[in-house]
Image (cartoon, rainbow, N blue to C red):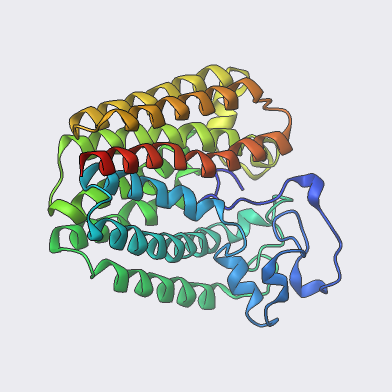
Amino acid sequence: MSPAPYPSDSASPSDTASGPLGPDDATTPDALPDTWVARTPRPVRPYLRLMRADRPAGFWLLMWPCLWSTALAVPATEPRFWALCALFLVGSIVMRGAGCAWNDIVDRTIDLKVARTAARPIPAGQVGWGRALAFAIGLSLTGLLVLIQLNGFAIALGIVSLIPVAIYPFAKRFTYWPQAVLGLTFNWGALMGWAAVYGGLAPAALVLYAGCLFWTLGYDTIYAHQDKADDLIAGVKSTALKLGPSTRAWVIGFYALFVAGLTAAGALAHMAWPYYLGVAATAAHLAWQTARLDIDDPPRCLDLFRANTGLGWLPFAGAVVAGLLAG
């Protein structure tokens, strides 16, 4: 259901397949039978689907702000850079999974009303909400093991992030801007990377966080256009419904502010010139997205949403090369 429940990289409506896996595998556009999850032991599959283990877009989108912030804070020549990147990779996977499970618990009645989500593990009856909650807690505790490898300030900051995580699933019930709440939630890593290096925050991290908020507003508004008809029936809100035909102009504005945030954060962090080449490539990629956007073409909206996972390499690579030159 839109907005993306901790973006899940779900398939488009045209991907629906009956599949050979049986009724408990819930073969719908949101749970395809041809992924690696379908080859795991049957009792495990609903939990892997609950955490979107076979839908990687969400954890990439959660991870990139962490890595960008880390690359702004410390050059790639330092061993701790790669150690922090590895920790943020693991943390992004498990905490995105916990967020998806929590979202599905909160939305279990609404998901029944949306074709793309009706056969997710909880509404399909494969996992009870109590077990789903225990699973989400287990994933969160795994995330805590990652978090405690950091300094005290970063640990406290990571714990505070649970507040927007808890609030986000309810946002669509009372505002047409739940994507903004998702942005506050999903880009916390823009603060965490810097905090993990310095034990505090600085303008560069804050500006990066603000810029990434607009990135999420852009890509998740595109994503939400897949579900706008079902959202009207279910009685929930999204920027797709709010912005309607004006979506392209708004997304251009969101993405422009994101690029401005990347640029300003780099300047505040005194990044060398290769970083700005990465930002320029990012801007070109976003221009391509907006040129191709058709809000009435759900498969294209999904493809453009997914494209943001690859986009993350552009500023990251620029920052890494800049750091290598500085080192």
* Closest to the observer, 190 or 80: 80
Query: At x 38% / y 70%, what residue is drawn?
Result: 140
Which quarter of the picture shows residue 324?
top left
**What is the number of callouts on the image?**
0
Which quarter of the picture shows residue 213?
top left
Q: Is residue 273 above or below residue 142?
A: above
Q: Is residue 178 visible?
A: no
Query: At x 60% / y 57%, what residue is drawn?
Result: 55
Q: Is residue 180 above or below residue 36?
A: above
* Closest to the observer, 153 or 86: 86
Residue 6: % across, % down: 50, 52
From the viewer's perspective, is 277 left or right of 231?
A: left
From the viewer's perspective, is 227 left or right of 99?
A: right
Quadrant position of the C terminus in the picture:
top left
Q: Is residue 277 visible?
A: yes
From the viewer's perspective, is 18 left or right of 108?
A: right
* Closest to the observer, 76 or 37: 76
Residue 210: % across, % down: 30, 34
Residue 76: % across, % down: 28, 50
Residue 11: % across, % down: 70, 50
